[in-house]
Image (cartoon, rainbow, N blue to C red):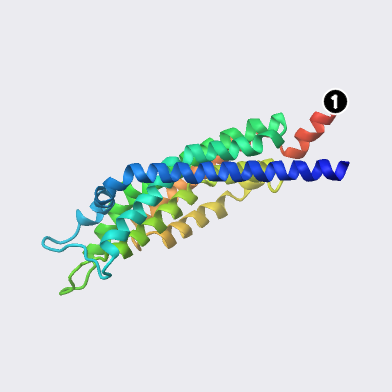
């Protein structure tokens, strides 16, 4: 009887998971259908940081026959995922929330919201701050006689990688909170490693940005500040083992 009940419960969870995954996919597709008409405009907006610094008379090119069609729609699909992310996170939360304790719910809900806002912040920082500086640098170091004519598909792949890199880098506070909450590390231990962290963020800044001190610093400093912010928020959370012990004492 127990095995039958367990099997039925597993089937119900799988059915709910399928339903929520389907809802996520449908939400992305609905947003995509609404934005598809503006695919060319969206790509034009994405290309503005590069077009603004390209030499007069130069343009972006398409080396593949189908890329003028597929590149804007590929970008629109990515934008659709970004736009639908709050609903996707809501579906994830609705699926995992019933299996969490009250104290875990109080932690996970802000983390889901905070992680999405930080990711959007990283993407915005890359577009409005890093791209103008990076593309200006790349254009200024082109050898004499070289005509700058960037392929639209290559440009899209390049900026999407940077978007995800900066979005992931801005998740540092979330990572620190989880490390402290799970007991993997502690606030005191991370504070003691601050000098190594500062060196590390500048190394990451050097790897993710053009080889000039301005853009490297523009990434490294926010990452350092986010590390400090993560320590501040992590200090408000007790490790999970301590919370479990407190819960058991209360019982």
Q: Is residue 186 visible?
A: no
Secondary structure found at label 1: loop
Where residue 29 appears, as percent x and y from the top left, is: 42, 46
Write down the quadrant of residue 70 in the picture: bottom left
Seen from the viewer's position, the closer of residues 40 and 169 is 40
Quarter of the figure that contains the N terminus = top right
The image shows residue 237, relative to residue 149, as above or below, that is above
Seen from the viewer's position, the closer of residues 198 and 163 is 163
Seen from the viewer's position, the closer of residues 48 and 183 is 48
Quarter of the figure that contains the C terminus = top right
Where residue 31 appears, as percent x and y from the top left, is: 39, 42
Tally the marks. 1
The image shows residue 71, relative to residue 80, as above or below, that is below
Q: Is residue 159 left or right of residue 41?
A: right
Seen from the viewer's position, the closer of residues 192 and 21 is 21
**Residue farthest toward the top in the current orientation of the protein:** 250
Q: Is residue 49 visible?
A: yes
Residue under the point 30% across and 55% down: 72
Residue under the point 69% across and 33% down: 98
Residue under the point 31% across and 59% down: 71
**Residue farthest toward the right in the current orientation of the protein:** 1
Write down the quadrant of residue 230 in the picture: top right
**Residue farthest toward the left in the current orientation of the protein:** 57
Q: Is residue 35 left or right of residue 236?
A: left
Where residue 138 appears, as percent x and y from the top left, is: 27, 63
Where residue 130 appears, as percent x and y from the top left, is: 33, 52
Residue under the point 35% across and 53% down: 75
Query: To which residue does mark 1 refer?
Result: 251
């Amino acid at each position: 009887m127990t095995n039958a009940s367990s099997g039925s419960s597993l089937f119900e969870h799988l059915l709910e998971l399928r339903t929520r995954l389907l809802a996520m996919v449908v939400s992305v597709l609905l947003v995509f259908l609404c934005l598809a008409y503006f695919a060319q405009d969206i790509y034009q907006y994405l290309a503005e940081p590069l077009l603004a610094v390209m030499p007069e008379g130069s343009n972006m090119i398409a080396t593949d026959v189908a890329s003028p069609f597929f590149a804007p729609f590929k970008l629109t699909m990515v934008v659709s995922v970004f736009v639908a992310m709050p609903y996707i996170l809501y579906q994830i939360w609705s699926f995992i929330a019933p299996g969490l304790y009250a104290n875990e719910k109080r932690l996970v809900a802000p983390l889901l919201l905070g992680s999405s806002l930080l990711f959007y912040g990283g993407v915005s920082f890359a577009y409005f701050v890093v791209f103008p500086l990076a593309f200006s640098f790349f254009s200024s170091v082109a050898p004499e006689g070289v005509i700058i004519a960037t392929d639209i598909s290559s440009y899209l792949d390049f900026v999407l990688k940077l978007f995800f890199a900066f979005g992931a880098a801005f998740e540092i506070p979330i990572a620190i909170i989880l490390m402290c909450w799970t007991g993997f590390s502690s606030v005191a231990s991370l504070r003691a490693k601050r000098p190594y962290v500062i060196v590390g963020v500048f190394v990451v800044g050097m790897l993710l940005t053009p080889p000039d001190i301005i853009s490297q610093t523009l990434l490294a400093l926010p990452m350092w500040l986010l590390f400090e912010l993560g320590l501040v928020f992590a200090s408000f959370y007790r490790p999970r083992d301590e919370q479990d012990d407190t819960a058991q004492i209360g019982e």
